Amino acid sequence: MRAALLLSTMAMLSIGTARADDVCTEAAKKIADATAVYVEKGAAAFWERVLKDGPLEGDKRSIGQVQALGQIEQFFGQIQSSSILSKKAIGKKDCYVVWMLEYSDGPAFAVANYYQSKKGVVATSMNFKTEPEAVLPTRLLVD
């Protein structure tokens, strides 16, 4: 009886982990898709894609992020690509992503939170900085 209960509990835990991992996998895909839009159509289109279907979609206050990306472009040139540096499932429906935007003359760093909502996996927060120590966990910067 205990063995059956233990197996049942372990199965439930693995389902929760699988869901969280799925959120992280989907978040990485969304970041890659948004980056492709950024390369092709610019920062405003990128930001619109990031917010699509999420709670911040259409929020005019988030325009500051587009302005921040514009300032980054002034220093570092055009966006080229992005790289996921770390993904961490937080609970069953949430993923914290650390990633890097790669411009022609330097990188910018970002943290994002993606959540499994009724509309799918959506961004609920995102922040960009040019200083890695402002965004990246120390363990990613120092051995």
Image (cartoon, grey):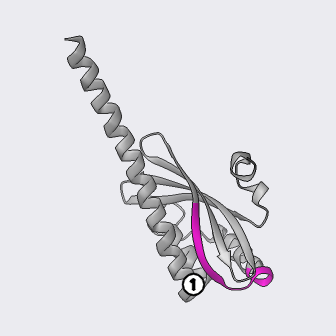
Magenta stretch: includes residue 79: yes
Give the answer, above or below, for where 56 lies relative to 2.
below
Residue drawn at (75%, 49%), measured in percent from left and top?
Answer: 142
**Residue 36 horizontal/vertical position (percent):** 51, 80
Magenta stretch: give its range. Answer: 73-84
Residue drawn at (42%, 41%), measured in percent from left and top?
Answer: 92
Residue type of the residue flagged with mark 1? Val
Between 95 and 62, the one lying in front of the other is 95
In the picture, measured across the screen, residue 121 lies left or right of residue 128, that is left
Dot 1 corresponds to which residue? 39
Give the answer, above or below, for where 33 lies relative to 118.
below
In the picture, measured across the screen, residue 70 lies left or right of residue 96, that is right
Residue drawn at (57%, 81%), measured in percent from left and top?
Answer: 38
Marker count (numbered): 1
**Residue lying at the far front of the rendered structure:** 143
Residue drawn at (47%, 39%), measured in percent from left and top?
Answer: 91
